[in-house]
Image: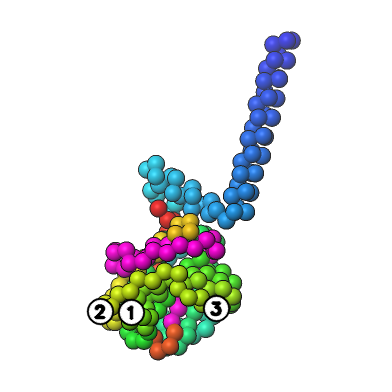
């Protein structure tokens, strides 16, 4: 009988330990969520680091067969010959995401005319947008790559600028990549880093494209993957 009691007590102790562990983990998850930590992104970085690179798939991808995945807030947007075509005029188009840390890759980005185009990241409240843009911007300071923060639909002065006088801005297909990881954002053009900025205001949100003024531009494909 004593042996049975000891086994019962041991089993009860393991059950209580398991419940406490679950409560502890739930508490950790709640705290991390309140502080804006992208839990799925963190998980994906961990499993990738230990050799399971395919454990987390793409968050989103689109080759612009249609615009069913997008919310047009304003402007002229259409699909043409398998590309997303935007402009002229002020245009904003979004795809919602709940993630915070990710890598955006846009293939086949071509600026045909005008002062430039922008890529939204960590965008929320898209009708009166909060978030960030990376801008491919020949109209700024003689030509520059810049990052801006947006608050309630209003753009602020750039928080990161890399001037590029003499750059071949027009008519050339570019591959653009933005890595948003924590409060640090790095932009690449054709595989080369062109700009890095830092801001901690927004921790998550969707992606999108922007045009303005006389800009016309086209984009071949977009994908959003876990940041590494």
Membership of 36 in magenta stretch: no
Identify the residue at horizontal 55%, vertical 63% (top origin).
Answer: 201
Seen from the viewer's position, the closer of residues 176 and 152 is 152
Identify the residue at horizontal 35%, vertical 76% (top origin).
Answer: 144
Membership of 187 in magenta stretch: yes
The quarter of the picture where residue 20 lies is top right
Q: Which of the two discs, 1 and 3, labels the residue nearer the N terminus?
A: 1
Tag 2 near tag 1, CB within 8 Å:
yes
| Disc number for residue 154 | 3
How packed is label 2: few (under 14 Cα within 10 Å), some, or many (20 or more)? few
**x, y percent for residue 120:** 47, 71
Identify the residue at horizontal 55%, vertical 78% (top origin).
Answer: 154
Callout 3 secondary element: strand
Colouring used for the render: rainbow
Q: Is residue 190 left or right of residue 127?
A: left
Extent of the magenta region:
185-211
- In 3D space, how far apart are the residues under numbered discs 2 and 3 (Cα atoms)? 29 Å
Report the residue marked by disc 2: 166
**x, y percent for residue 174:** 30, 72
Report the residue marked by disc 1: 143
């Amino acid at each position: 009988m004593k042996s049975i009691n000891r086994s019962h007590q041991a089993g009860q102790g393991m059950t209580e330990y398991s419940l406490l562990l679950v409560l502890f983990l739930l508490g950790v998850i709640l705290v991390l969520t309140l502080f804006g930590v992208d839990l799925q992104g963190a998980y994906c970085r961990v499993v990738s680091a230990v050799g399971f690179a395919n454990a987390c798939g793409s968050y989103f991808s689109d080759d612009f067969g249609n615009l069913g995945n997008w919310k047009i807030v304003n402007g002229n947007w259409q699909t043409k010959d398998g590309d997303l075509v935007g402009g002229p005029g002020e245009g904003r188009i979004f795809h919602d995401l709940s993630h915070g840390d990710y890598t955006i890759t846009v293939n086949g980005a071509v600026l045909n005319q005008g002062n430039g185009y922008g890529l939204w990241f960590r965008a929320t409240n898209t009708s009166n947008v909060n978030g960030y843009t990376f801008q491919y911007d020949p109209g700024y300071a003689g030509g520059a790559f810049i990052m801006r923060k947006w608050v309630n639909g209003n753009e602020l002065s750039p928080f990161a600028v890399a001037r590029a006088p003499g750059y071949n801005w027009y008519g050339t297909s570019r591959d653009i990549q933005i890595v948003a990881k924590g409060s640090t954002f790095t932009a690449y053009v054709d595989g080369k880093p062109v700009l890095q900025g830092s801001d901690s205001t927004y921790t998550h949100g969707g992606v999108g494209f922007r045009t303005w003024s006389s800009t016309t531009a086209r984009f071949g494909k977009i994908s959003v993957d876990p940041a590494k």
